Image (cartoon, grey):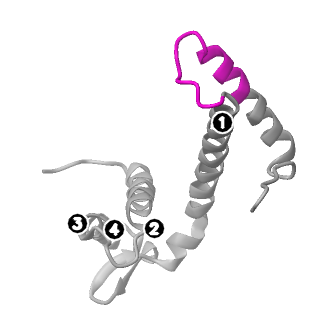
Amino acid sequence: MKIELTEQQFRYLLDLVYIGNWVINSTRENDRIQEYDQVESLIFSHCLHHKMSKLVELYRGELIPSRAFADGGIHEAIEQYEDVVFYEILAEELALRDMDGEPLTRENYGELMERIDAYLSEFDEHGTDNISVDLP
């Protein structure tokens, strides 16, 4: 297979590959999915031919994204995504809790969305400052 990309498109592809592998493997300790690591290594190996050698380094015989790449802002994009997902999941879970376990139906969907929106507005304004948990 041959894919033709501009230099800028290739640089965007590096971000996408890194983020994808991060999502799949970053929470795994001893059970990384090696096939994704291998694809990441293959894609990043092309940096050597595109004057982007500073974005890749050799580690234990494998080409991996370099520290310069990882420290270059990609994790800020990942963190932004994680923040949004965290608040959206939290808002939905709290809204469902507030509905006392009622099964979601067409009739109560609007109520659920109103509760989710209320929580999201609260989180936008105050973050987690007003959240409390009563531990036993």
Q: Closer to us: mark 3 or mark 2? A: 2
Residue furthest out toward the left: 1
Q: Closer to us: mark 2 or mark 1? A: 1
User: Answer yes or no: do the residues labelled 3 and 4 have beta carbons within 8 Å?
Assistant: no
Residue 71 screen position, x and y as percent = 58, 72
| SS label for mark 2 | loop
Residue furthest out toward the top: 107
* Mark closest to the chain's N terminus, 4 or 2: 2
User: Answer yes or no: do the residues labelled 3 and 1 have beta carbons within 8 Å?
Assistant: no
What kind of residue is marked 4?
Phe
Q: Residue at x 44, y 63 (%)?
A: 22
User: Answer yes or no: do the residues labelled 3 and 2 have beta carbons within 8 Å?
Assistant: no
Residue at numbered disc 3: 35
| SS label for mark 3 | helix
* Mark closest to the chain's N terminus, 3 or 2: 2
The Cα atoms of the two marked residues, 1 and 4, are separated by: 45 Å
Residue 127 screen position, x and y as percent = 81, 48
The Cα atoms of the two marked residues, 2 and 1, are separated by: 27 Å
Q: Which residues are magenta?
A: 100-116
| SS label for mark 4 | helix
**In magenta stretch: residue 41:** no
Q: Which mark is residue 44?
A: 4
* Mark closest to the chain's N terminus, 3 or 4: 3
